[in-house]
Amino acid sequence: MFHRRRFRLRLPSRALLLGERTLVMAVLNVTPDSFSDGGRFFDPDAAAARALALERAGADIVDVGGESTRPGAEPVPADEELARVLPVLERLRGTLRVAISIDTRKACIAEAAAAAGAEILNDVSGLRADPALAEVARRRRLPLVLMHMRGDPRTMQKQPFAREVLAEVRTGLRKAVARALQAGVKRSQLILDPGIGFGKSFRQNYELLAHLPKLAALGFPLLVGPSRKAFLGATLGTPEKPVPPEQRLWGTAATVAAAILGGAHIVRVHDVAEMAQVARVTDEILRAG
């Protein structure tokens, strides 16, 4: 059985130990158009209440995002993205005890969010969209999640897929790491995400989950986010008639368990209470192995 390495992330308010147990990152989309929960928490008060509920359900991190990156999504202007996330962060300051992550591709949003209390930066573009985001991470001394995405949200599921997905993801993540290190971000503050569902075919998502140990061999903590993704809808239904996102709970549970057994340190999910149970039991299997 795969042996998961341990890491220590330094946040402004605390340290996060990675590898002793799996950490659960909760999705909080402050958007009108995200694929699963778009519009549900668009109001700042509703979003803040949701964050507190996610904490009670067992979240270790709450990941706040103001721009949908679902397939086909259009980019959001910076001022609009900021208007979505900043009121939520302001309401959560001093009330949410777990760490807040900001899901953004823009350095200016990362800077404003960090000033408002966000302690982790989560960049789905792997510093391709705005390399200056690495400077924010360096100056603020914040952990930085680097994700692999083929193309951008508008095109990622329309252009040809990679012939060898594992090789491409490894290469892409190495390049993202190089960009971060060149900007002065400490190696110990980097987390890698293979980007399940971002520019991959349905089969390639399963291939990445099956071969996560090869990505763990890059020497960084892994974050994996398979929650409610389209490949699960197609598997549980058909590609032509997929099961809707809210009915993908058990499929998500299977992928979360597989990700942990493959070396994931953090799982990013919508259904926190259920996936916290999955993580807890799967961690025991790892320890027994």
Image (spheres, rainbow, N blue to C red):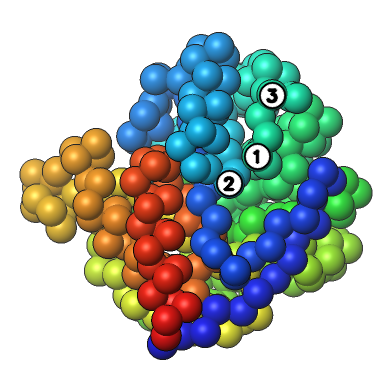
Q: Which quarter of the rendering shows the N terminus?
A: bottom left
Q: Which amino acid does label 1 sit on?
A: Val
Q: Which quarter of the rendering shows the C terminus?
A: bottom left
Q: Report the number of numbered marks.
A: 3
- Distance from Cα at disc 2 to Cα at disc 3: 14 Å
Out of 100 and 42, give the one closest to the viewer. Answer: 100
- Relative to residue 13, is residue 262 drawn left or right? left
Q: How crowded is mark 3: few (under 14 residues within 10 Å), some or many (20 or more)?
A: few
Q: What SS does tag 3 mark?
A: loop
Residue 47 drawn at (x, y percent): 52, 20
Residue 131 drawn at (x, y percent): 75, 52
- Distance from Cα at disc 1 to Cα at disc 3: 9 Å
Out of 98 and 34, give the one closest to the viewer. Answer: 98
Q: What SS does tag 1 mark?
A: loop
Up/down of 140 relative to 29, above or below: below
Corner quadrant of residue 143:
bottom right
Q: What residue type is labelled 2?
A: Asp
Q: Name the residue carrying label 1.
A: 98
At 49% across and 27% down in the image, what residue appears?
53
Q: Could you tell which of marks 2 and 1 lies nearer the N-terminus?
A: 2
At 49% across and 74% down in the image, what residue appears?
263
Q: Name the residue carrying label 2.
A: 60
Up/down of 144 relative to 105, above or below: below
Q: Residues within 10 Å of mark 1 (few under 14, many from 20)?
A: some
Q: Name the residue carrying label 3.
A: 95
At 47% across and 60% down in the image, what residue appears?
224
At 36% across and 29% down in the image, what residue appears?
37
